[in-house]
Structures are given as C-alpha cells and as structure tokens.
Amino acid sequence: MQKRKINPTTISITLITISTLACQISLPRLSTPQEETLLPTSPSSLITTAPPLPTPTPTPSPSLDSPNEVGEEEIIGTEIDLTPTPELTPTITPQAILIFVQPQSPVYLVNFLHPELGCKWSGVAGQIFNSVGEPVNGLIVEISGELNGNPFLRLGLSGMSIPIGPGGYEIQLSDKPFDSRNALYLRVFDQDGKQLNETLPLVTYNDCQKNLMIINFSLLNQPLREKTYFPIIFR
C-alpha cells in the first residue's frame, strides 16, 4: 500500500477555509456583568426621624372659690399636731381654797382615842366645822406620802370618829410613834373628789406623849379664829 503524499499547499488552503468558516459563524453575545456603582450616601439619610411626641396638656388647678371643685381639705391635707403632750403633774394647791386649818392646830396629845394601846399607836384625828361652828360630815381626809421608805396612803371620813366628836375623823399612821418631817401630807376632798384645802405637810415625833396629832378645819373660806375645838376626854 502506497502512502499518499499531501501537498503543503492543500493544507494551507484547508486551514484558510476553516478559518473563514469560523469567522462567519455568529456566536451569541455574552453580556459582561457590570459592577454596580455605589454612590456615597449622606449620613443624614441613614437617620430615621421619629414622629414628634404629643405635647402634654396642663391640667388646671382646682379653684378653692368654686363650690363644684375639690374641697379645701382635699387640697391642703390634714394638719398633724406635732406638739408633745405635756406630762400631768399632781395638783398641790386647789384652785379655790374652801377649808382652812383652825388656829392652834396641830396640837400634839397623848393617845386618848385608844387608851388600851397606849404608846403602841400613833395617828392623826380632828373635826371639820362650817363657818357657824356646825360639824360637817362626809368629807374625805387623805394622808399620803412616804413612811419608813415605803409609799403610804390612808383615808378617813369626817363624822365617823365618835370618840373625837361630831364631824370627827381619825387616821392611824403606825403602831408606834416616830419622827418625820414633811414626809406625809394631809388633804381634804369632797364627795366629788375636789380638793378643798391647801396640801398640809405633817410633822410627827417619836414621843409617847405626842403620838396623837389633832388638826381641826373650818369650811366656807371663813376660818374660826375665835374658837378652837378639842374633843372632850372622859376618864
């Protein structure tokens, strides 16, 4: 078998023909993507403006002169009194002195009210009279204070001590005489608890001849200065 020789001229023509055909073929045009041009953005365009808030409407204050408005006590409020309450102190002198100690009172005597006790008794007794010398019954006689370091309080009633006489009262202090000065006080009250006399401080003695103290009173702001009453002592 013989090999066919190819003419170089023929090869050149063939290549030219192929190139011509290739140039005549219309290929579809491909669009090249274009870069999107980013324009600079203003900073103010990025800020979103919020809608304006509603303006609050002021509420008119209620008028105190109008009867249809809120009452004054609701506007002002309740006032609180911060003033401290003063402590109560016992009254020593009554507002009106209605009973006085008779002149020459007190008188110190031996215990004749309870002769069987003798010196084993000490106390206070007396009578209460009105301005014309009549005995007054039903008044309360109080002796209070301190005795031997302990609180002391005892009561008597005028008209209840028969040995003393009409309008007489009697209060035992101790079972023996003792010395004291202004440790005990005597006050006279009516049935309503009103103090009638100026508080009277008492003085006692450790003496069996002075273990009975006699104190007489007169009422109605008119002291009996001419007469002094003492109980009658029977033996």
Image (spheres, grey):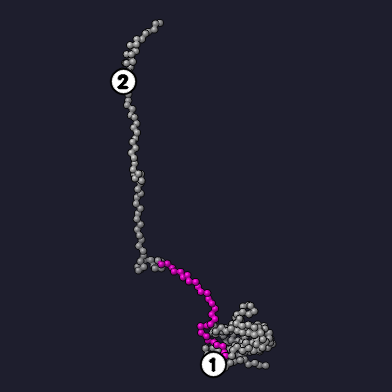
- Our reading of the magenta stretch's main secondary structure is loop
Q: What residue is at 59 percent from the left and 85 percent from the top?
A: 157
Q: Report, in whole angstroms, how far the alpha carbon at label 2 lies from the one at label 1.
A: 167 Å
Ranked by sequence position, the earlier of labels 2 and 1 is: 2
- Residue 100 magenta-highlighted: yes
The residue stretch that appears in magenta: 76-103
Q: What residue is at 32 percent from the left and 13 percent from the top?
A: 13
Does dot 1 land on a helix, a strand or a loop? loop
Residue that badge 1 annotates: 132
Task: Report whether residue 208 is seen.
Answer: yes
Q: Compare residues 180 and 101 and report the one nearer the observer.
A: 180
Amino acid at dot 1: Val
Give the residue at the far left of this rendering.
24
> Residue 49, image x and y in percent?
35, 48
Q: Toward which corner of the image does residue 7 lie, by quadrant?
A: top left
Amino acid at dot 2: Cys
Image vertical order of residue 2 relative to residue 231, above or below: above
Q: Toward which corner of the image does residue 24 lie, by quadrant?
A: top left
